[in-house]
Image (cartoon, helix red, strand yellow):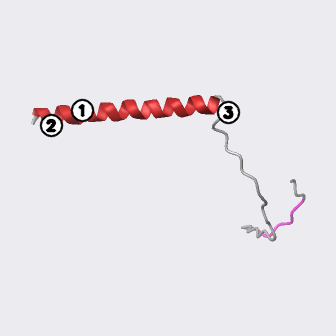
């Protein structure tokens, strides 16, 4: 039973070290600018529905 606990602890440590390695690798790539995500395309907005709880007037719309 003691061997099983040691294996479980060892497995957790290996997973922790692997996770930290992946995290630091990703953060280094993003610092270099290689991890940038560039998306191109169009956004089609035709209608917007707004719901208000009260029936007051809108004084101004800031966009």
Mark 1 nearby-residue class (10 Å; few <14, some 14–19, many ≥20): few
In terms of secondary structure, what is the magenta stretch mainly? loop
| Left or right side of 39 for 46 | right
For residue 38: magenta? no
Location of the C terminus by quadrant is bottom right
Residue occupying image coordinates x 54% and y 34%: 26
The answer to which image quadrant residue 3 occupies is top left
| Left or right side of 18 for 32 | right
Labelled disc at residue 33: 3
Percent across and percent down for residue 24 are: 51, 29
Q: CA distance from mark 2 to mark 3?
A: 44 Å
In the rendered view, would you say 2 is above or below 59?
Answer: above
Percent across and percent down for residue 11 are: 27, 35
* Nearer to the camera, 47 or 13: 13
Callout 2 touching callout 3 (CB < 8 Å): no
The secondary structure type at the circle numbered 2 is helix
User: Mark 2 — residue?
Assistant: 4
Q: Earlier in the sequence, mark 2 or mark 1?
A: 2
User: Mark 1 — residue?
Assistant: 9
For residue 55: magenta? yes
Location of the N terminus by quadrant is top left
Mark 2 nearby-residue class (10 Å; few <14, some 14–19, many ≥20): few
Callout 2 touching callout 1 (CB < 8 Å): no
Q: Earlier in the sequence, mark 1 or mark 3?
A: 1
| Left or right side of 17 for 8 | left
Q: Which residues are magenta?
A: 54-59
Residue occupying image coordinates x 59% and y 32%: 29
The answer to which image quadrant residue 16 occupies is top left
* Residue at the extreme front: 34
Callout 1 touching callout 3 (CB < 8 Å): no
Q: CA distance from mark 2 to mark 1?
A: 9 Å
């Amino acid at each position: 039973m003691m061997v099983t606990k040691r294996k479980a602890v060892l497995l957790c440590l290996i997973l922790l070290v692997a996770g930290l390695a992946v995290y630091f690798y990703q953060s280094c790539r993003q610092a270099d600018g290689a991890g940038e995500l560039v998306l191109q395309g169009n956004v089609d907005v035709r209608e917007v529905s707004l719901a208000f709880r009260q029936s007051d007037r809108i004084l101004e719309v800031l966009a």
